[in-house]
Amino acid sequence: MGHEAFVLHRQLRKDADVTGSFGHGEKADTVRAASELTSHSFELGKALKKTNSLWTSKLRTVLQGCAHISNHLDYINMYMTPLRMFPMKSLTHTAPP
């Protein structure tokens, strides 16, 4: 499940970035459209800008959740036995006394 969360994070970051906030190219068309509409005194420009802002905020929240799930489950997979959810006794070897 950790891997699936990682894949979802990567895909959302690329495909759901309608504002260009995550470094995928220039400003998105919606940001440019909001600016153009606002510059011509259309109220729709302000609404589109607010929608973009809300979308980006919600997207960041989902991305953080995906990252948290991915990191946590990868950590569990590294330090837990595959069939039981009990911690392994030792991850390092110690020399006998």
Image: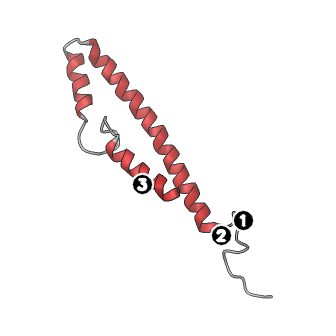
Mark 2–mark 3 Cα distance, whole angstroms, equals 23 Å
Q: Earlier in the sequence, mark 2 or mark 1?
A: 2
Sort mark 3 into few (<14), some (14-19) or many (20+) by Cα contacts within 10 Å: some
At x 45% / y 54%, what residue is drawn?
A: 6
Q: Tell me where residue 95 appears, x and y as whole percent.
A: 73, 86
Q: Are the residues flagged by discs 2 and 1 in contact, CB closer than 8 Å?
A: yes
Q: Amino acid under label 1?
A: Phe
Give the labeled residue for mark 1. Answer: 86
Helix, strand or loop under label 3 = helix
> Extreme front residue here?
83
**Label 3 or label 1, whichever comes before in sequence order:** 3
The quarter holding residue 26 reads top left
Q: Is residue 31 left or right of residue 52?
A: left
Horizontal placement of 32 versus 14: left or right? left
Left or right: residue 78 compared with residue 84: left
Q: Which mark is residue 81?
A: 2
**Color style of the picture:** secondary structure
For badge 2, the amino acid type reads Thr
Identify the residue at image location x=31%, y=22%. Answer: 48
Q: CA distance from mark 3 to mark 1?
A: 27 Å
Q: Is residue 68 above or below residue 27?
A: below
**Rendered residue at 71%/66% (across/down):** 87
Disc 3: which residue: 7
All told, the count of numbered labels is 3
Q: Earlier in the sequence, mark 2 or mark 3?
A: 3
